[in-house]
Image (spheres, rainbow, N blue to C red):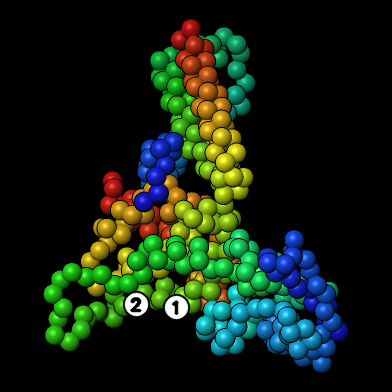
Amino acid sequence: MVRAVTSFGRSGLSDWLLQRVTAVILVAYFLCIGASLLGGVSYAEWKSMFEGTAMRIFTLLAVLSLAAHAWIGMWSVGTDYLTERLMGKTGNVLRLAYQIGCGLVIFVYVIWTIQILWG
Amino acid sequence: MLQVSIYRYNPETDSAPSMQDFQVDTGGKDLMVLDVLEMIKAQDTTVAYRRSCREGVCGSDGLNMNGKNGLACITALSDTVRDNKLVIRPLPGLPVVRDLVVDMSLFYRQYEKVQPFLQNNTPAPAIERLQSPEDRAKLDGLYECILCACCSTSCPSFWWNPDRFIGPAGLLQAYRFLADSRDTATDERLAKLDDPFSVFRCHGIQNCVNVCPKGLNPTRAIGHIRNMLLSRAT
Ligand code: SF4
């Protein structure tokens, strides 16, 4: 078995499944947001919509889904193109830097969302 | 006159690969690409390529013809030539030994990983292990693979990770033994496939299905493996 300590769930199956489930959650969330935007919302309506606990939980769920989905996807891209096979040792350094960068951006987005929702 | 451009490379003497042009008189016939290669070989005996059965059975002459992988012996000029031009390159993604001959070690290593042989630790019956016609039918579309490597070398996931992604050919064979009613190692086989690379590097691009000279469908087999992993784990 191929070892992969930086993959999300360490197993190909769990990453694969998680990516599908999170994609469905994201579609549901964006449809929901799209539907409310389509009718045209005022600032007050928008604000009160996000004051409801259900909407906050749904939004947080969507952002956590986005985080997991993005990590799995970006990890796949990095392990395809930034590798020792393609660029020698530099590939390993670049890949690790890239993974740290991706992780940091995702982390910031999650915290920022929590701050917006409950701040 | 058919314009043929052939990839030439001898890693021992050449600093870089180059393309060499040939003119071939096909006499207006719809020859197979292998026939054209034989005519070129008569013009220049140093052109190297693999071939054996010349009828799509041995899988030796897998090549990239006008950008698409296939067997030279069963690819007619009318199927591949555009504007009277034919560009022949080795199978992509594998190290070139010489001209159109590639080193297949990585491909075979992946094949070896799936343990492509029947495993059954129950006592052997007196004559043979029987299988119902229905169970036997499950192996159709799987056992016919001739290991030509056209599929795996057309797969971008295999290009980037040929050491970790088993690739369409190997996975088709993995499923051939997972689907075999006589094989008892299903669980051990599946356990070895559950990492992020072996199976899950397949992103369903389906180049494999597009090029397989035997008309096989590795993508479908990979889907079956994924479903087996899923039902085993959830
Ligand atoms: S699945 Fe088809 S293309 Fe792939 S190695 Fe087997 S015969 Fe060749």
Residue A41 point in image, percent of width and height: 60, 17
Q: Nearer the viewer, residue B223 or A25?
A: B223
Q: Is residue A3 left or right of residue B105?
A: left
Identify residue for label 2.
B137
Looking at the image, which residue is at 20% across and 84% down?
B128
Residue B121: give x, y in percent of width and height.
18, 69
Q: Is residue A34 left or right of residue A71?
A: right
Q: Mark number for residue A78?
A: none
In the rendered structure, the answer to whether residue B176 lies left or right of residue B154 reads left
- What secondary structure is marked by label 1? loop
Of the pair A14 and A62, the residue shown nearer to us: A14
User: Which residue type does callout 2 highlight?
Assistant: Ala
Which tag is nearer the camera, tag 2 or tag 1?
1
- Tell me the subunit letter for badge 2: B
Q: Which residue is nearer to you in this view: A1 or B27? A: A1
Q: Report in which chain the residue with disc 1 lies.
A: B
Residue B151 falls in image quadrant: bottom right
State the image coordinates of residue B93 (x, y, percent, origin top left): 61, 60
Q: Disc 1, ligand 1: is the CB inside 8 Å? A: yes
Q: Are marks 2 and 1 in contact (CB under 8 Å)?
A: no
Write the residue at 48% across / 16% down: A111
**Label 1 sits on what residue type?**
Glu
As displayed, is residue B28 above or below residue A44?
A: below
Disc 2 and disc 1: Cα gap in Å?
A: 12 Å
Badge 1 is on which residue? B144
Name above or below for residue A25 compared with residue B85. Answer: above
Is residue A103 among what the camera can see? yes
Mark 1 nearby-residue class (10 Å; few <14, some 14–19, many ≥20): some
